[in-house]
Image: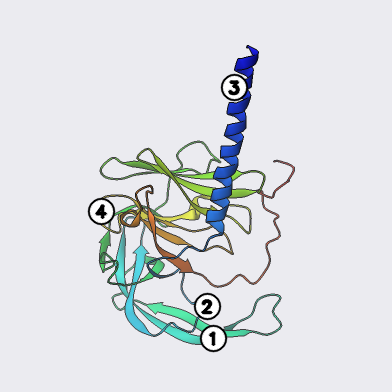
Amino acid sequence: MSSSATHVQRRVNALALVLMGVFFGATVRAQEMRLEGVTQMVFGDAVWTADKGYKASRNWLALACDANDCALESARLTPVRAKWQGHYDDQPTWGVELRFSRPNKSARKPIAWLRKTSRLSWLKPGPVPTYASALGGVRAAAGIGTMEIELKSPTGSVSRLVPLLRKDKGQFLLQLRSDNKRQMLIELGACEHEIDMSYLQWSGDMDGDGKTDYLIDSASSVGEPVLYVSSLANADELVGVAAVGIVTPFGGECDGGGWLESGSSDQ
């Protein structure tokens, strides 16, 4: 290779490294930003929160599933005054425990609870087209250990959820790929540094626009589940945030002992 060609190649390599740094820097900043949804979501039952603004209401829905399908079912929220104490807290903190019930309870198991809002007209009782759920199982897209998930809609559209390892930080950043686009979603396993494919809790067409939506769990004691729907996506996105779920606080500490630990012997 000539000296001029070598010089050009070095400039290209340097530019690639800079762009990689910009990409990861922007990605990490995005992960650190607080996501905000259009409506409220509670992930699990009897969840404790310090937010005492929750009131008894019938204006809720359960995303409930069995092994074959899912539906949005009418639900009632009953907040109950309760206290919670973390492992290192000297005194308990008073808040409320969010308890839900379904007046027309089916055999389906609730995955999440969503508050109805006029801003999301599709949040109403009824069956929900479902491609995968935590109760119905998901399938890997590639070999064992990749943690990738492939989803196919009835129209033949294929999407992939791909956990990307940022080795220097010991992070898994989830990327969505579909329709020749890619979009970074949330960080997985931020506390335990271990994940499995249960990060996908549900996928289907909740908003009824014919495109795929996703309920993603952070797979971490300190993370929050997020409902992404295609109808809220910006021009350069595949999905937008419909709801960010609350979970009972984590009372312990992240010891970094998982298999994604930065600097571990297998990295």
Quarter of the picture containing the C terminus is top right
Pointer 2 or 4: first along the chain: 2
**Mark 4 surroundings: few (<14), some (14-19) or many (≥20) residues within 10 A:** few
Q: Is residue 206 shown above or below 25?
A: below
Pointer 3 or 2: first along the chain: 3
Pointer 3 or 4: first along the chain: 3
Q: Residue at x 69, y 75 (%)?
A: 87
Q: Are marks 2 and 4 in contact (CB under 8 Å)?
A: no
| Residue identified by numbered label 4 | 209
Please give left or right for residue 137 compared with residue 262 in the image: left
Amino acid identity at mark 3:
Val
Q: Residue at x 46, y 69 (%)?
A: 44
Residue 95 in the image: state x and y as whole percent.
54, 84
| Residue identified by numbered label 3 | 8
Badge 2 marks a residue whose secondary structure is: strand
| Residue identified by numbered label 1 | 82
* Furthest residue toward top: 2
Residue 219 in the image: state x and y as whole percent.
54, 57
Q: Nearer the viewer, mark 3 or mark 4?
A: 3
Q: Are marks 2 and 1 in contact (CB under 8 Å)?
A: yes
Amino acid identity at mark 2:
Trp
State the image quarter where residue 122 is shown: bottom left
* Furthest residue toward bottom: 81
Pointer 3 or 1: first along the chain: 3
Mark pair 2, 4: CA separation: 34 Å
Q: Nearer the viewer, mark 3 or mark 1?
A: 3
